[in-house]
Image (cartoon, rainbow, N blue to C red):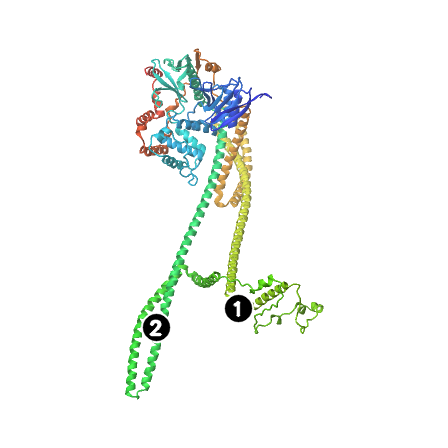
């Protein structure tokens, strides 16, 4: 920038943001583009471009040559730039992708709407839209950065929702579930309730209109499939969305209106896989196709566009566009897609390799963070589940306790009733024994009175008979009572067993104490109710125990009369003067006694004079009041005072109970805190012990590595010795075979053998030394392993070995990361955007409507295989996805409205019926030689 230059504001809109920049008037388009891509962190800039709306309201892809304020709108943002007249479209494009952080720039470009309403890839004038200009063949293989993935995802999703890309209803619902996962993450029942997706645009309006389903039903269906993606990262959800979407027939295709030599109106489709010809009323099913590997040259002259195939015997493929600028756009798209097509089949550049390495590192880091988060969430779920189990268990125990208490009360009531019946039975038995005793006495009297008169004997016999009858009756009753007694005893035993069963054998004494406590509590409640009743009665007729005052006190106070005023006081001769046992302080304190003089008890009446009569009245009233209280203190308390004292005692007891409860709670809290502190101390000590163990383990691992390296060296020395021994054996065999050779040769061989023997002897000496060292190393290894086992536990030895392997792999990964980081730093010092090459004459091509001949030769490689030959849709390769789409199609068929079916729906249904998909159709239309396909095009 030039210091002091005039600053202007520009905006560039991406797919998910709107960026604003303050730039100088001298800023070039490339500088603006670099600023954009730097802001958004984009490095895959070759996919992207800048679009603006020209003076006629048309979107145009830009090259930035004029000094204007421009805006670039991506799928989620709008960026604004101030650029110079000399700024190129590539420079603006670089600034955009730099602003949004895009590196896969080869897919993108800048587009604007030209004066005739056609979307044109831009060379920038004013407001820009940052869009993908080129599409990858396979998103899973080519998209590297998350920002590139996000921009593609937003653009493809917007195209599907706007019906620019036809998507079947069942696929639309499945894609919507991935879109929700990408935006909101995992489904959470507590946060994602009904109506949560009401404001999200998730389905094409065509799909909604074609089915008799309410908004809530659509939302329920999408949320059902959303729950299937739990645990999937947002970036993975976007990738799954694109992997499904790239199999749609209209994905990544740029359509242009053309005519053949017969004047038939057709569609030309340009995409990453080649050129396709469509009938006017069918954009889903291409009729003729040419892969990029079969094209060697493209050119146009005025409205005539010529494609020269590699097969020079085949005729040229010629069509006509409605305007020259359409041919220019077709040429630019063909060149860009062909360049990317060839680049995919070459080794990655260093920049792409660096981006892939960085992407892998970031993905691994995110995966590790995700795993940590999932572990934390799982731990939290386990804790919440355990807490819920404890709460449920506590609740069930409380319910069981309540049932047990209810059964216990019932059993106690039964026991009381049985005990009362037993008491009645015992009383009947006592009565029977008493009657029997009386009968015995009467019999004794009868025996003694054998000589009495007959009349008396008769009378006694009658009495005895009556008594016997009564005794018999009582015996019958006793027999009945005995049987009832046995039954009652059995019931009592059953009740006691039931009591023991509910309360537990060991808790029987506790239940008895509880019953006593309940009895005492009932008694206390009875007393409280009586006291409350008395208090209520007293409060109904409140009596204030004021000191009685004479009715004439008012007159006494208000007047200054000097009449004689006298009051008789209540007296009780039995009241003992309280001062009889009272002693003065002087009497109790010897020092004070010496200072005061004794009072003369024979003194006359105490007479004094007040300054006014009203003073005497006040003195008199106070004396009367104090005397009345003096007498009241020596009488029993009134019912009101008793009630107040009882209430005060109750309040004091209640406060005492509350204080005891509080103390118990504080004690429990202190115990809990103490226990928690013990746990923390224990955990801290365990962590310290673990750190020490890990430190010792690392030391042992280092020792093991050193020893293993020495063992490897020793093994290498042994291998070398064996090799030399084998050579010696071979030479000895040769010597044995050459016994008849000439003396000179034999001498030469003997010298070689001697040299080899000396070398073998030297190696043997070294091996002997190594053997002794090996024994020492093995002992050290065993010691290290024992130490390792001691630190990690015998059962954890395998884990430690795995950990050693992991540390080794991690070290290797860190080395690769450091190398990748260094390479990335070197690349960032000299950034290179892998834009699709554009011809220097593109500006002239775009700005003019000239009819000159424009031709471009394309790189060719006859060994390149057509990629669609082995290509399969994701639904065909993934059985789970196939089943999901099948289930969705079945569910939606029940509510489908056939009257709302569109032309594309009918075409798609027919293609499915015939077993065709995107890649099967492409393979079919590319069969045969080029000449046959060109002839077929001419005859359409």
Quadrant of the drawing holding the N terminus: top right
Residue 931 vertical placement versus 156 (above, below): above
Gap between marks 1 and 2 measured at Cα: 49 Å
Residue that carries the numbered disc 2 in the rendered image: 428
Residue 391 vertical placement versus 153 (above, below): below
Q: Position of residue 334 (x, y in %)?
A: 42, 18
How many numbered markers are drawn? 2
Quadrant of the drawing holding the C terminus: top left
Q: Position of residue 619 (x, y in %)?
A: 62, 65
Asked if one can make out residue 267 in the rendered structure from this viewpoint, the answer is yes
Q: Nearer the viewer, residue 13 or 771?
A: 13
Q: Position of residue 3 (x, y in %)?
A: 60, 21
The image's mark for residue 40 is: none
The image's mark for residue 636 is: 1
Q: Position of residue 770 (x, y in %)?
A: 55, 37
Residue 268 location, quadrant: top left
Q: Secondary structure at mark 2?
A: helix
Q: Secondary structure at mark 1?
A: loop
Q: Residue at x 55, y 35 (%)?
A: 766
Q: Nearer the viewer, mark 1 or mark 2?
A: 1
Q: Report crowding for label 1: few under 14, some 14 to 19, many 20 or more residues within 10 A (C-alpha).
A: few
């Amino acid at each position: 920038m030039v210091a002091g230059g005039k600053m202007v504001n520009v905006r560039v809109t991406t797919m998910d943001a709107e960026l604003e920049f303050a730039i100088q008037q001298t800023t070039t388009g490339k500088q603006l583009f670099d600023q954009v891509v730097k802001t958004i962190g984009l490095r895959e800039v070759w996919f992207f471009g800048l679009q603006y709306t020209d003076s006629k309201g048309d979107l145009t892809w830009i090259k930035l040559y004029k000094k204007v304020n421009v805006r670039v709108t991506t799928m989620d943002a709008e960026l604004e730039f101030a650029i110079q007249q000399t700024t190129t479209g590539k420079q603006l494009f670089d600034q955009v992708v730099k602003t949004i952080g895009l590196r896969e720039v080869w897919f993108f470009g800048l587009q604007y709407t030209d004066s005739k309403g056609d979307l044109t890839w831009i060379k920038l004038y004013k407001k820009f839209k940052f869009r993908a200009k080129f599409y990858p063949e396979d998103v899973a293989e080519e998209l590297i950065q998350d920002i590139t993935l996000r921009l593609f995802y937003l653009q493809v999703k917007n195209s599907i929702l706007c019906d620019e890309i036809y998507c079947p209803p069942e696929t639309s619902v499945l894609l919507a579930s991935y879109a929700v996962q990408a935006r909101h993450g995992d489904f959470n029942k507590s946060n994602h309730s009904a109506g949560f997706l009401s404001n999200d645009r998730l389905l094409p309006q065509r799909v909604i209109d074609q089915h008799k389903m309410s908004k809530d039903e659509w939302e329920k269906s999408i949320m059902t499939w959303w729950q299937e993606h739990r645990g999937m990262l947002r970036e993975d959800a976007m990738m799954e969305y694109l992997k499904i979407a790239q199999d749609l027939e209209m994905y990544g295709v740029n359509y242009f209106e053309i005519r053949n030599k017969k004047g038939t109106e057709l569609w030309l489709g340009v995409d990453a896989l080649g050129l396709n010809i469509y009938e006017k009323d069918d954009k889903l099913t291409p009729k003729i196709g040419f892969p990029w590997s079969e094209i060697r040259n493209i050119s146009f002259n005025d409205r005539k566009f010529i494609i020269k195939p590699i097969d020079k015997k085949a005729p040229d493929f010629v069509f006509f566009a409605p305007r020259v600028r359409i041919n220019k756009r077709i040429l630019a798209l063909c060149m860009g897609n062909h360049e990317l097509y060839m680049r995919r089949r070459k080794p990655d550049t260093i920049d792409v390799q660096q981006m892939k390495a960085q992407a892998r590192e970031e993905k691994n880091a995110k995966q590790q963070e995700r795993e940590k988060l999932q572990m934390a969430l799982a731990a939290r779920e386990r804790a919440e589940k355990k807490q819920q189990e404890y709460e449920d268990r506590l609740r069930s125990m409380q319910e069981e306790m309540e049932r047990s208490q209810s059964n216990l009360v019932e059993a106690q009531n039964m026991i009381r009733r049985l005990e009362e019946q037993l008491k009645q039975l015992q009383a009947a038995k006592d009565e029977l024994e008493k009657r029997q005793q009386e009968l015995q006495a009467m019999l004794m009297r009868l025996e003694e009175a054998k000589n009495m008169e007959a009349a008396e004997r008769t009378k006694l016999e009658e009495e005895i008979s009556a008594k016997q009858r009564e005794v018999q009756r009582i015996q019958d009753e006793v027999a009945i009572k005995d049987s009832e007694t046995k039954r009652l005893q059995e019931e009592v035993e059953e009740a006691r067993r039931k009591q023991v069963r509910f309360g537990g054998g060991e808790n029987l004494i506790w239940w008895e104490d509880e019953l006593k406590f309940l009895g005492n509590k009932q008694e206390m409640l009875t007393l409280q109710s009586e006291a409350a009743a008395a208090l209520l009665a007293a409060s109904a007729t409140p009596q204030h125990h004021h000191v009685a005052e004479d009715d004439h006190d008012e007159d006494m106070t208000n007047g200054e009369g000097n009449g004689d005023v006298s009051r008789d006081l209540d007296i009780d001769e039995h009241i003992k003067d309280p001062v009889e046992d009272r002693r003065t302080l002087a009497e109790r304190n010897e020092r004070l006694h010496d200072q005061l003089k004794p009072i003369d008890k024979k003194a006359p009446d105490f007479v004094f004079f007040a300054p006014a009569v009203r003073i005497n009245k006040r003195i008199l009233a106070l004396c009367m009041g104090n005397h009345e209280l003096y007498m009241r203190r020596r009488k029993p308390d009134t019912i009101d005072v008793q009630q107040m004292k009882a209430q005060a005692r109750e309040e004091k007891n209640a406060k005492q109970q509350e204080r005891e409860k509080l103390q118990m709670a504080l004690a429990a809290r202190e115990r809990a805190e103490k226990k928690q502190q013990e746990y923390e101390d224990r955990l801290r000590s365990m962590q310290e012990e673990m750190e020490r163990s890990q430190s010792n383990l690392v030391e042992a691992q280092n020792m093991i590595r050193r020893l293993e390296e020495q063992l490897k060296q020793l093994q290498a020395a042994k291998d070398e010795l064996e090799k030399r021994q084998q050579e010696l054996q071979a030479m000895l065999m040769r010597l044995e075979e050459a016994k008849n050779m000439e003396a000179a040769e034999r001498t030469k061989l003997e010298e070689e053998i001697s040299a080899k023997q000396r070398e073998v002897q030297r190696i043997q000496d070294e091996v002997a030394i190594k053997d002794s060292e090996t024994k020492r190393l093995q002992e050290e290894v065993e010691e290290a392993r024992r130490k390792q086992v001691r630190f990690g536990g015998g059962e954890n030895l395998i884990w430690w070995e795995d950990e050693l392997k992991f540390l080794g792999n991690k070290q290797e990964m860190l080395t690769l990361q450091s190398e990748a980081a260094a390479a990335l730093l070197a690349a960032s010092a000299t950034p290179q955007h892998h834009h699709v090459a554009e011809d220097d004459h593109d500006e002239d091509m775009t700005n003019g409507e000239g009819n000159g001949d424009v031709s471009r030769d394309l790189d060719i490689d006859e060994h390149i295989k057509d990629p669609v030959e082995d290509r399969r849709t994701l639904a065909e390769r993934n059985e789970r996805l196939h089943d999901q789409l099948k289930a969705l199609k079945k569910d939606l068929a029940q509510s489908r409205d056939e009257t709302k079916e569109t032309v594309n729906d009918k075409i798609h249904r027919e293609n499915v019926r015939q077993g065709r998909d995107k890649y099967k159709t492409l393979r079919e239309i590319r069969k045969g030689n080029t000449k046959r396909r060109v002839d077929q095009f001419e005859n359409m």
